[in-house]
Each structure stands twice: as structure tokens, then as C-alpha cells.
Image (spheres, rainbow, N blue to C red):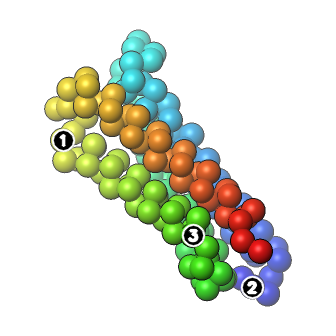
């Protein structure tokens, strides 16, 4: 990775694609949980977008790991990287808790709305933190 400009660029592109798939599918789900587009059934929307989000997570995590391994010391010394990792972990745990522990079907409207706000905040904050890594440091 460190010795091939094009390999690094390809993996970086895969990382951006993974993030786009993840955030691009999570945000519409969150908006539906907040009450927008009530004519769309949540289960139908979920059936369509959750696999896209899962694919995005898998792609972002695998490509992100390769990017990290290219310069682990530099990333670990960067506070924004650590912030991003905490936000990503919190976003993943929140998604799993909302989907599997309580279940979308069992949660009340207030819980779903709070969950949607927390989810959107976590993922957008992780996105911003990750993007700012390129501009932080020396």
C-alpha cells in the first residue's frame, strides 16, 4: 500500500464508496423513522436499504483497515482518527441495538425518533471526523 500510489488510490476509492453506501442508506431509514414519507412501509424500506448499509459497512471496514495498515503510527497519533473510530463503533453498536435488541417492531414512536436522531448524528459526525483527518496534523 505504501509503495503503490494506484493501489492506495483504489483502496481509498473503495473506502469512500463504502461510506457512501452506508450513510446513503442509513439517512433515508432515519428520516423514515422520524416520520417522513409515511406512505413508505418501514419494513419494505428496511428490506431494501439494510443490505446496502451492511455492504457499505463491510466495504468501509475492510478498505479502512488496509488504509490504516499503510500508516498505523500516523493514524494512531491523530486525535480525529480516534474520534472517528469511537463514533463508528458507537454507530455500529447503536444500529445493532436498535435493530436486534429492542427491534424496530417493538419500539415505540418516541424511541424510534430518538434512535433516528442518534444514528444520524453518529454517522454524520464520523463522516466529518474522517474527512477532517486529511486536513489535520502537520
Point 77% across, 68% down: residue: 9
Q: Dot 2 surroundings within 10 Å: few (below 14), some, or many (20 or more)?
A: few
CA distance for labels 1 and 2: 44 Å
Residue displayed at 60% across by 56% down: 129
Front residue of 35 and 76: 76
Question: As drawn, is 64 to the left or to the right of 87?
Answer: right
- Residue 101 in the image, given as x and y percentages of width and height: 19, 47
| Residue shown at the point (18%, 41%) measured from the top left | 102
Question: Is the residue under label 2 in contact with that under label 3 (CB below 8 Å)?
Answer: no
Front residue of this view, candidates 49 and 69: 69
Q: Camera-side residue: 125 or 70?
A: 125
What residue is shown at x 75% (from left), y 62% (from top)? 135
According to the picture, the residue beneath numbered tag 3 turns out to be 79
- Tell me the distance, in whole angstroms, between the alpha carbons under discs 3 and 1: 33 Å
- Which mark, residue 102? 1
The residue at which mark 2 appears reads as 2
Label 3 secondary element: helix
Q: Position of residue 30 (x, y in %)?
A: 43, 32
Nearer to me, 44 or 33? 33
Amino acid at each position: 500500500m505504501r509503495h503503490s500510489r494506484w493501489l492506495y488510490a483504489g483502496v481509498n476509492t473503495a473506502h469512500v464508496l463504502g461510506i457512501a453506501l452506508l450513510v446513503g442508506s442509513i439517512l433515508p431509514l432515519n428520516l423514515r423513522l422520524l416520520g417522513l414519507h409515511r406512505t413508505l412501509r418501514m419494513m419494505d424500506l428496511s428490506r431494501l436499504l439494510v443490505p446496502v448499509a451492511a455492504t457499505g459497512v463491510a466495504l468501509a471496514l475492510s478498505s479502512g483497515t488496509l488504509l490504516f495498515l499503510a500508516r498505523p503510527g500516523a493514524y494512531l497519533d491523530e486525535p480525529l482518527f480516534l474520534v472517528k473510530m469511537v463514533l463508528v463503533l458507537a454507530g455500529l453498536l447503536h444500529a445493532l441495538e436498535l435493530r436486534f435488541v429492542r427491534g424496530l417492531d417493538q419500539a415505540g414512536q418516541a424511541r424510534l425518533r430518538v434512535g433516528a436522531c442518534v444514528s444520524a448524528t453518529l454517522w454524520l459526525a464520523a463522516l466529518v471526523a474522517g474527512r477532517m483527518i486529511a486536513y489535520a496534523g502537520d
